[in-house]
Image (cartoon, helix red, strand yellow):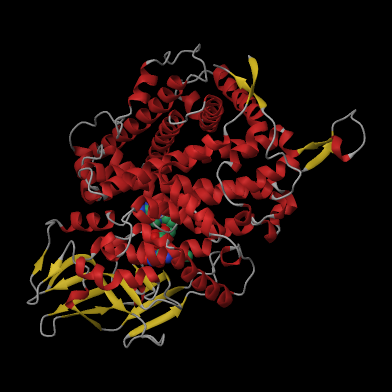
């Protein structure tokens, strides 16, 4: 192995990471400055909420929110830009979530589910925050199972109004952002009844407060109180007691009720309609995945800068003096804590960029229904992987900073508390991975609408399960690499990208096919479909995870291919190797049990992780600095010292060709 000096091109690395929406990232770096957006910690809850609302107005003044709104109402019609804008708000995650509620969920639902009239009437004041609002979907009794929520909206043809009602205590709307203090209007999800027929879940605009801030007649509001994080957001509960709203308050893009009560919809199947409606709202889920990525990047930036300067213990035999003490990041154990997490953060970054691009293109009308199904599944998987990764990584970073990491001033505890809920809202991760697995089993041919229990029964008794590894986009580069792979034998170079891709592809194929066979076998025994699926839940979740690990690797490889600088490409390739090797290392038991790796090769994987960590160590700070998070957003004294070598000289990198 030869060693070559490597000068990473910082500008190119930043360009690559900033990607298609670099202008939005630059805008954020430009406008999110000063006291208006500085991180805050330890404020009393009411003060924190007040500040967050004030900041939301300040943010509205920057125009950052206009990206996601249609041009017809003064927006920029740039869906991808709106997701990237959200993720840049890592300076204040309460503000990030408040922004998500106001513009992404509340405004996004009016945009996606309403008609032109709704857009013209409401979206300008939603954008300016003159009309603060809520997205009221979850109920105490039904969180993940939205289809079975209990709030009703019953049409009364005599007055041409809907009567919105909370029929039982478990039907109260719960955890609703903006409800406890600021919201005036809510998009309320309810079972729509007309002429005695239940048409399933629909969304309506329901005023919840008057202009003085008092609850509207028939609306009861309660504060959820203090939370584990994001306490600048006012989450609350809502009850409706026969609240009447005009017929035109129904967001009627997918289902409408005429003055006489006649129901009409462009989508005949109730199930399909429901999942189509939900499918239009996935922007929030993609945004949360991006926000989680930013939180992980911020924590890693703090922890790696600190690890690069903090010293503990002296090398035996060296001279006395602090300068002789060992930097934390020179310890292999410390590298192993942080560098595989950094590699995965990069991998997820590229997967996020790819997903945002697809979302953007589909929102502009490019793509068919299958593409939409694939996107929904991809988003479900990515959101779960990214948010779990953030939670785990931030905790690791906290520990990696020792006692200093526990000080609120150093930001990590706040990042942890604020991003924790990302694993639950916008879809609980476990539930999302189950949705993804169902889509994998049917090869995306059906919508989630057909993947309920009945759909599963059909699947279990239906046509033979076919090849699951079907690349969703044309990825000729990946095909080329896999085709050129040296085979799965003992001699293949662990760092051969084609071999790595094939290894993860093979694992996915085996796990998903095994799951399909297991479900069918059990079903043939005459077992109940629910029980069969339930007994295989571990396998179901594994299928989704291994699928996503393969998809994320492909996105990383495609991302590196866009890099225009040789040395930077080389560095990113090492980082990608570390991503793959740490994924394989984590799942060594499976690869051994299924004879995909021999015992000696599995040990070589461990050695490879060590080797890659050592090789990447000198570049770690550069790699986090390339995220482009402003120092004032990090605001952690341990990450802002002068002494660390952020502008360091070229350093050697392992050259494996
Ligand atoms: C701070 C905060 C803000 C929120 N903001 C909003 C908002 O603005 N608007 C809104 O409508 N909602 C909001 N929510 C609600 C959020 O979307 C829900 O909490 C979420 O959908 C999960 O629902 P749940 O809490 O009922 O959990 P549950 O669905 O009860 O899940 C609890 C546990 O059960 C597991 N579980 C559930 N079903 C299954 C299954 N089939 N198989 C295996 N395990 C399962 C889950 O994995 C989870 O671990 C917010 C929540 C919080 C905490």
Establish if 124 lies above or below 534: below
Evaluate whether residue 423 shows in this view: no
Residue at (74% x, 47% y) in the render: 642
Q: Is residue 127 left or right of residue 386?
A: left
Evaluate whether residue 649 shows in this view: yes
Picture quadrant of residue 608: top right
Q: Nearer the viewer, residue 406 or 87?
A: 87
Picture quadrant of residue 519: top left
Residue at (31% x, 56% y) in the render: 77
Establish if 216 lies above or below 233: below
Residue at (18% x, 61% y) in the render: 254
x, y percent for residue 626: 57, 41
Q: Is residue 101 left or right of residue 74?
A: right
Q: Quadrant of ligand 1?
A: bottom left
Q: Quadrant of the N terminus?
A: top right
- Residue furthest toward the top? 491
Picture quadrant of residue 136: bottom left
- Residue furthest toward the right? 320
Q: Is residue 584 left or right of residue 335?
A: left
């Amino acid at each position: 192995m030869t060693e070559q000096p490597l000068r990473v091109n910082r500008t190119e690395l930043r360009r690559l990471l900033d990607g298609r929406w670099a202008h939005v990232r630059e805008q954020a770096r430009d406008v999110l400055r000063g006291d208006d957006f500085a991180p805050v910690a330890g404020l009393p809850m009411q003060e924190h909420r007040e500040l967050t609302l004030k900041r939301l107005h300040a943010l509205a003044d920057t125009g950052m929110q206009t990206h996601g709104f249609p041009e017809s109402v003064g927006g920029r019609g740039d869906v991808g830009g709106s997701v990237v804008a959200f993720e840049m708000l890592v300076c204040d995650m309460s503000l990030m979530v408040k922004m998500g509620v106001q513009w992404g969920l509340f405004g996004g639902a009016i945009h996606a589910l309403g008609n032109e009239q709704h857009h013209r009437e409401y979206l300008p004041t939603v954008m300016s925050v003159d009309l603060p609002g809520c997205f009221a979907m979850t109920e105490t009794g039904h969180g993940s199972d939205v289809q079975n929520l209990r709030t009703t909206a019953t049409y009364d043809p005599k007055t041409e109004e809907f009567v919105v009602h909370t029929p039982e205590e478990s039907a109260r709307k719960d955890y609703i952002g903006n409800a406890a203090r600021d919201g005036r209007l809510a998009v309320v999800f309810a079972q729509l009844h007309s002429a005695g027929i239940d048409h399933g879940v629909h969304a309506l605009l329901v005023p919840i407060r008057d202009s003085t801030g008092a609850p509207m007649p028939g609306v009861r509001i309660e504060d959820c109180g203090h939370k584990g994080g994001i306490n600048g957001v006012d989450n609350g509960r809502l009850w409706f007691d026969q609240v009447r709203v005009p017929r035109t308050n129904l967001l009627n893009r997918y289902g409408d009720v005429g003055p006489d009560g006649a129901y009409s919809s462009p989508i005949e199947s109730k199930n399909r309609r429901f999942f189509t409606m939900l499918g239009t709202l996935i922007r929030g889920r993609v945004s949360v995945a991006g926000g989680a990525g930013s939180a992980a990047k911020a924590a890693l930036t703090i922890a790696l800068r600190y690890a690069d300067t903090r010293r503990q213990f002296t090398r035996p035999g060296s001279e006395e003096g602090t300068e002789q003490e060992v930097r934390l990041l020179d310890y292999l154990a410390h590298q192993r804590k942080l560098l595989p997490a950094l590699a995965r953060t990069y991998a997820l970054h590229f997967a996020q960029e790819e997903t945002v691009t697809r979302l953007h293109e589909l929102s502009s009308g490019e793509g068919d229904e299958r593409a939409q199904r694939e996107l929904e599944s991809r988003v479900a998987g990515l959101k779960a992987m990214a948010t779990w990764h953030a939670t785990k990584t931030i905790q690791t970073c906290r520990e990696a900073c020792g006692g200093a990491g526990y000080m609120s001033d150093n930001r990590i505890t706040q990042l942890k508390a604020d991003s924790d809920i990302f694993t639950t809202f916008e879809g609980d991760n476990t539930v999302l991975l189950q949705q993804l697995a169902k889509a994998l089993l049917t090869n995306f041919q059906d919508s989630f609408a057909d993947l309920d229990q009945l759909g599963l029964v059909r699947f279990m008794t239906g046509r033979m399960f076919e090849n699951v590894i079907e690349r969703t986009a044309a990825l000729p580069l990946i095909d080329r690499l896999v085709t050129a792979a040296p085979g799965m034998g003992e001699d293949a170079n662990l760092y051969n990208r084609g071999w790595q891709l094939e290894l993860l592809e093979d694992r996915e194929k085996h796990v998903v096919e095994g799951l399909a066979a297991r479900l069918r076998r059990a079903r043939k025994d005459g077992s109940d479909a629910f029980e069969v699926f339930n007994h295989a839940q571990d396998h179901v979740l594994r299928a989704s995870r291994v699928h996503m690990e393969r998809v994320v690797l492909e996105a990383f490889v495609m991302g590196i291919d866009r890099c225009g600088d040789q040395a930077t490409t080389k560095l990113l390739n090492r980082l990608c190797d570390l991503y793959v090797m740490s994924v394989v290392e984590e799942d060594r038991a499976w690869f051994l049990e299924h004879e995909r790796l021999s015992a000696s090769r599995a040990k070589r994987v461990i050695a490879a992780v060590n080797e890659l960590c050592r090789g990447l160590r000198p570049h770690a700070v550069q790699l986090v600095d390339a995220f482009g998070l402003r120092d004032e957003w990090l605001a952690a004294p341990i990450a802002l010292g002068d002494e660390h070598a952020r502008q360091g000289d070229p350093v050697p990198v392992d050259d494996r060709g």
